[in-house]
Amino acid sequence: MQYFRECYIDFPKGIVKPSESPDFIVQMKNNHDLGIELTRLSPANAKPPDDKDFEQIQKRESLIEQTRELFERSNPLKLFVKFLFSEKYKIKHGTEFMVSVQLVNEIRKVVQHKNEKQFFKQTISASLLPKGLESVLIVNHPALETSIWERANNLGISNDVVDDIRKSIHKKDQKLNIYQKQRLNYYWLLVFTDRLHGVKNFNLANKIINHKFESRFQHVFLFDLIKAGVFQLV
């Protein structure tokens, strides 16, 4: 939520408080209250992984866990870290430990001059990463008590992102009556995803922007975490 607030230039000024149904309430300076519900974009149209995919997933998750352990040996900071692997270049067998060491060094550079008691986020680009990785997202929040290091798009890559977005909106629209029991002035829906990506070869961002979505929420946003991209859908 804090990440979205920093990325969306028109986020209303006010006090943000965690809640339940919806997830957050913004007490705005005009004495109006805004409820924001969060939901992760589920790739319902993703192709199930086969045996070869499972083997690749296990290797990547093992590398991530090894990297986390190496980092936390010398730094107790609890971070939210997303690793976006390249589908074009694979990490060569036998180089995993060396890759982990390189990753740890780059992550240490990011956090060494940061105030761990404040929210911060930074993405490490491919030019600074070992071959086989496209980017690494690092987010710190002082309320985070448990490390979360994982693969980006770990739920799969969708065959139809637009349909998945539509389904996510519809699912939350059905629960809007529950959220409205809070008697707030406005309701927003924030659909977030690790990295907006589809299996088809076209400009996915343009396709989403040009598509007409409907919702009972006053506004619906799609938030690409790794690219820090915000798309207003409604």
Image: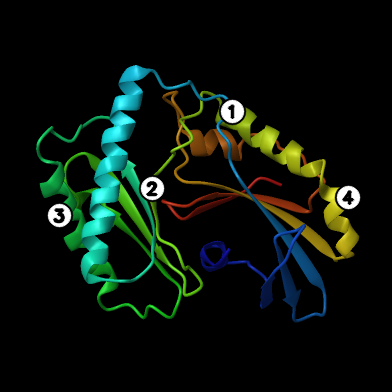
Which comes before the other along the chain, label 1 or label 4? 1
Q: Are marks 4 and 3 in contact (CB under 8 Å)?
A: no
Mark 2, residue position: 150
- Which label sits in the foreground, 3 or 2? 2
Compute the Cα span from label 3 to label 2: 17 Å
Residue 232 x, y percent position in the rendering:
63, 50
Residue 167 x, y percent position in the rendering:
69, 33
Q: Is residue 63 above or below residue 88?
A: below
**Residue type (three-letter) at the residue carrying disc 4:** Asn
Q: Is residue 86 visible?
A: no
- Which label sits in the foreground, 2 or 1? 2
**Residue type (three-letter) at the residue carrying disc 3:** Gln
Q: Secondary structure at mark 4?
A: helix
Q: Quadrant of the image for the N terminus?
A: bottom right
> As rendered, which of 200 and 103 lies closer to the eye?
103
Mark 4, residue position: 177
Mark 3, residue position: 102
**Residue type (three-letter) at the residue carrying disc 1:** Ala
Which comes before the other along the chain, label 3 or label 1? 1
Q: Which residue appears at 25% of the width and 75% of the height?
A: 112
Dot 3 crowding, Cα within 10 Å, few <14, some 14–19, many 20+: some
Q: Secondary structure at mark 2?
A: strand
**Mark number displayed over residue 203:** none
**Mark number displayed over residue 44:** 1
Quarter of the image for residue 78 reads bottom left
